[in-house]
Image (spheres, coloured by chain):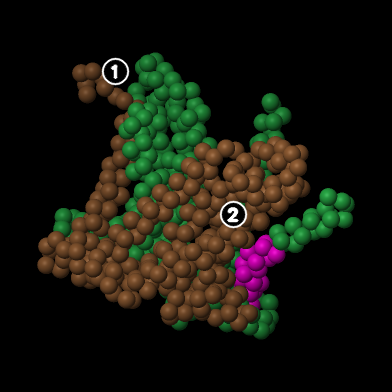
Amino acid sequence: MTKRKATVFRPTAFSFPYLAVTLIFVIVPLILVLVYAFRGEDGGFTFDNFRQVFTEPETLRQLGQTVGIAALSTLICLLIAYPVAYILASNPFNKMAILALLFVIPMWINFMLRIFALQSLLSMIGIGKSYTAAVIGMVYDFFPYMLLPIYTVLANMDKSYVEASRDLGATPVQTFFKVTLPLSIPGVVSGISMMFMPIFSSYAITKMMGDMNTTVIGAKIASLFENQNYGSYGYGSAISFVLLVLVLVVMLIGNAIVRRTEKAPKGGKA
Amino acid sequence: MNKTSSRLYLVIRWVILLLVLVAIYLPLLMIIIYSFSSAQSVGDEFGNFTFRLYAKLFENTKMLSALKNTLIIGLVSAAFATILGTTAAVGIHYMRKKVKSVVDTASQITVVNAEIVTAMGFFLLMIFLRDSVEIPVNFSLWWLIITHTVITTPYVILTVAPRLQQLNPNLLEASMDLGAGPMRSLFTVMLPQLAGAMVSGFALAFTLSLDDFVVTNINSFGANIDTISTYVYSGIRKKGVPVEIRALSTIIFVVVLAALIIYNVVKNKRAKEQAKKA
């Protein structure tokens, strides 16, 4: 270091502390998950944990229910957020800067307090702990995260495409489905990915708003670690590993969709 | 479109927006209103207007300590994340393309991964360090600060990196050619240019930390540390949250709202001044 002082220091070295932290606190834990997932109670290599994941009816039911809740809540949220984003990006609402802000402010408020507030209101109007309440909770919690990417895409969209479509004789409905909607797909994909997978971990919402039978898989994993009982770590890690694979699959699908829409001629295919 | 139908269209759009706004804010509004009532739960008979819950809040040591923990973890981890994320962004900025894409991918792991998996990864790491490596560590406030730093740093990088790309690429080199050491170059040349992005990064890291539940919940098993999130969660699941949570919520809503309004007013003002200059 001292000999060639002038040339030895590279600015890339500024990232070394971060790289060390990432290695210890991100990479090593993932390796540990892998190790525990494939380790039996005797310490040897085994597939038993995975066998248990795919044969235990309770876990399978919870996985299935998680996918169901995630799909349903994401769909409902999208069906509400898209029109709102579309309206906010349209004239004259796009000139009211503070209006769009009002819709995303809840993002900055602690989500547990928001869920508490929502739960109070729902039980006031007679909706107790139930599957429905849990789905409402998901939609309420993730709404700003769904809205923001869609709104950003729609607000920054080049309006001349829409004008061209209208000039060429397309009706407003045709213009929406053949121009606006295809162009906004990246925002929609980003909104869905901000919601779909995170719901798998949102056991706070199902525990607080759902009934006994309503749950997401995150609750199962949490309960396996809660007791600091070594015996259940392998099983918990195996479920986590399955989630890891799922995250990758969902991401690849999302990327593929975005790439396809970007490749398609601007304005989308019929 | 003729005049009446376009007016009707405008009215419909207003109605949709207002309906959604009501759905978003009604729960918060009810909490605020009922923070001035001693009713057991929202929707009960209101009774007299009172500040009793606010008085009770300052006597509830458990709730106050949860608030204190939340703020300590948030502020300290956001400070760490800002330092770590900014230096990382500078370093990554000067990496060769191939190395850069690897590091970028690695930094995205905790962002895209299911939070529960990240949380139990931290948990397993602690067990590993404590029981296998036999380092005298355990679940504690410091552990929560570290885990929050790790999950929020990528967001600081994402905030600072775009600003770096706008800077003159030769800035750091010029400074070092002129004889400043790497540290001095970083502090006197790079950081002043990045100050704005660093503030945004800090704010983002802070809010993400305040909002976190899953990582905190799993990594405080047995540590007996509560943040606002875990406190409310266990309260609702067990015998119910003390009523003074409504007072605390109201204070938090008002503070967040005020901070956001001030931030946006300042931002708009600056944008206008810049527009004037240009």
**Most foreground residue, B146 or A125:** A125
- The local secondary structure at tag 1 comes to helix
Magenta stretch: give its range.
B19-39
Does the image show residue A143? yes
Image spot of residue B93 (x, y percent): 40, 31
Residue bearing mark 2: A147
- The local secondary structure at tag 2 comes to helix
Magenta stretch: helix, strand or loop mostly: helix
Q: Residue at x 15, y 68 (%)?
A: A41
Q: Residue at x 36, y 30 (%)?
A: B97
Q: Would residue B156 be found to the left or right of residue B126 on screen? A: right
**Most foreground residue, B166 or A211:** A211
Question: Disc 2 is attached to a residue of which chain?
Answer: A
Distance, label 1 to label 2, CA atoms, is 50 Å
Nearest-to-viewer mark from 1 and 2: 2
Q: Is residue A240 above or below residue B183?
A: below
Image spot of residue B98 (x, y percent): 33, 32
Q: Is residue A118 above or below residue B115?
A: below
Residue bearing mark 1: A6
Residue found at the far right of this picture:
B3
User: Which chain is depicted brown?
Assistant: A
Image spot of residue A194 (x, y percent): 49, 54
**Most foreground residue, B52 or A137:** A137
Q: Residue at x 64, y 72 (%)?
A: B30
Residue A75's image quarter? bottom right
Image spot of residue B203 (x, y percent): 50, 47
User: Which chain is depicted green?
Assistant: B
